Image (cartoon, helix red, strand yellow):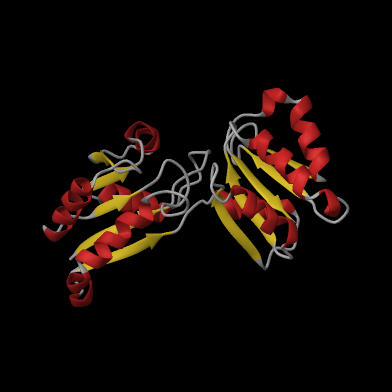
Amino acid sequence: MSTFSVIGTPIGNLEDVTLRALKVLAESDLILCEDTRMTKRLLDRHSISVPTKSYHMHSTISRIEEIIGLLKEGKNISLVSDAGTPGISDPGSELVRHIREDMKEEISLGTLKIEAIPGPSALTAALSIAGIACADFTFLGFLPHKKGRETLFKEIAISDRAMVFYESPHRIIKTLQSLVEHLQGDASIKKITVCRELTKIFEEVVVGSPTEVKAYFDIHADKVRGEFVVIVS
């Protein structure tokens, strides 16, 4: 039986990896990575010597066919992203879909197993320290650059649920400005929580009204860097 393991890896601190994840990585025949250089840091830290190969959003169908071919040969393959759990706002889900479609007979016969090796996620990490009621929330991933962006902000403005999304340092100020504009009428009831650099040395959580949070990052321009999780509640 061959196994395709989808493994959650650290989002910052390299010690945030499970014993099971390390065991599966060490026993793999091949590890698929978004960026092999990023994954090498984790593997070197834990003395794991397993061949790696890139799989990312620009990978062609031939790379997917190559991976499926290796699984049919009985190889054990692991998939990791640069940070967090594959398939959450990255192309891992597309690869899993192709494997499930092309190897459904092998899955049915039990000669291929697709398994989840749970691990870190910026989404759940942010919600755990935000201090908000979040039994019911909507995750938006990365907001679109253009098409549909304004529609999403309108949905965020009227939603009764907490709305969570990822943002890059290149667009966080523009996004906060859009939240100020769209939430003007709800300034007294809508709260913004911005979690930055989770699990890293400069981890920070900024909470306030849309205007307050925007002003904070305007004043502290040196902190407009790293990865951001934004929660509107």
110 is higher (above) or lower (below) than 36 = below
Q: Residue at x 33, y 52 (%)?
A: 23
The C terminus lies in which quarter of the figure? bottom right
211 vs 61, left or right, is right
The N terminus lies in which quarter of the figure? bottom left
Q: Residue furthest top?
A: 222
Q: Where is residue 155 drawn, in percent x and y?
A: 67, 59
Q: Residue furthest left?
A: 73
Q: Where is residue 87 drawn, in percent x and y?
A: 42, 54
154 is higher (above) or lower (below) than 106 = above
2 is higher (above) or lower (below) than 78 = below
Q: Residue at x 32, y 53 (%)?
A: 24
Q: Residue furthest right?
A: 188
Q: Residue at x 61, y 35 (%)?
A: 171
Q: Where is residue 153 drawn, in percent x and y?
A: 67, 51
Q: Where is residue 43 drawn, in percent x and y?
A: 35, 38
- State the image quarter where residue 128 is shown: bottom right
Q: Residue at x 28, y 45 (%)?
A: 31
43 vs 143, left or right, is left
